[in-house]
Image (tube, grey):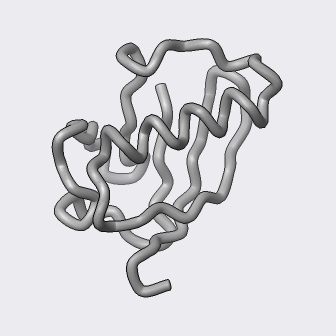
Amino acid sequence: MKNKLLVTVIVPAIEMEYDVYIPNNKMIGTIKQYIITSIIELSHNTFTKPLNEVCMIDRDRQVEYDNSMYVKDTGIKNGTKLLIM
């Protein structure tokens, strides 16, 4: 599990949060797509925002992540809380 990070994904729009393992060698855009797909399934289609309108923000550092960055270059670490807005 050296290449995976355990983060908490918080989705205020549906008042839910999920603990998710994400690989640190993938791009934020890819991770965001995986997360959004999972949220849609887990929320039984309650979350309906399109991928291009969703932003991923580090809750504590208040940083919005660019889709073209690699996770390993963002400062995301185990325990990071990510907001999906």
**Which x, y percent locates residue 4?**
45, 73
Closest to the observer: 35 or 15?
35
Q: Residue 44 lies in what quarter of the image?
A: top right
Q: Is residue 37 left or right of residue 5?
A: right
Most distant residue in the bottom direction = 2
Q: Residue at x 49, y 33 (%)?
A: 84
Closest to the observer: 16 or 50?
50
**Which x, y percent locates residue 23?**
41, 65
- Disc tally is 0
* For residue 12, above or below residue 61: above
Q: Is residue 51 left or right of residue 38?
A: left
Q: Is residue 68 left or right of residue 33?
A: left
**Which x, y percent locates residue 52?**
36, 17
* For residue 4, above or below residue 67: below
* For residue 84, above or below residue 79: above
Closest to the observer: 26 or 62?
26
* For residue 22, above or below residue 29: below
Q: Residue at x 37, y 47 (%)?
A: 58
**Which x, y percent locates residue 38?**
65, 39
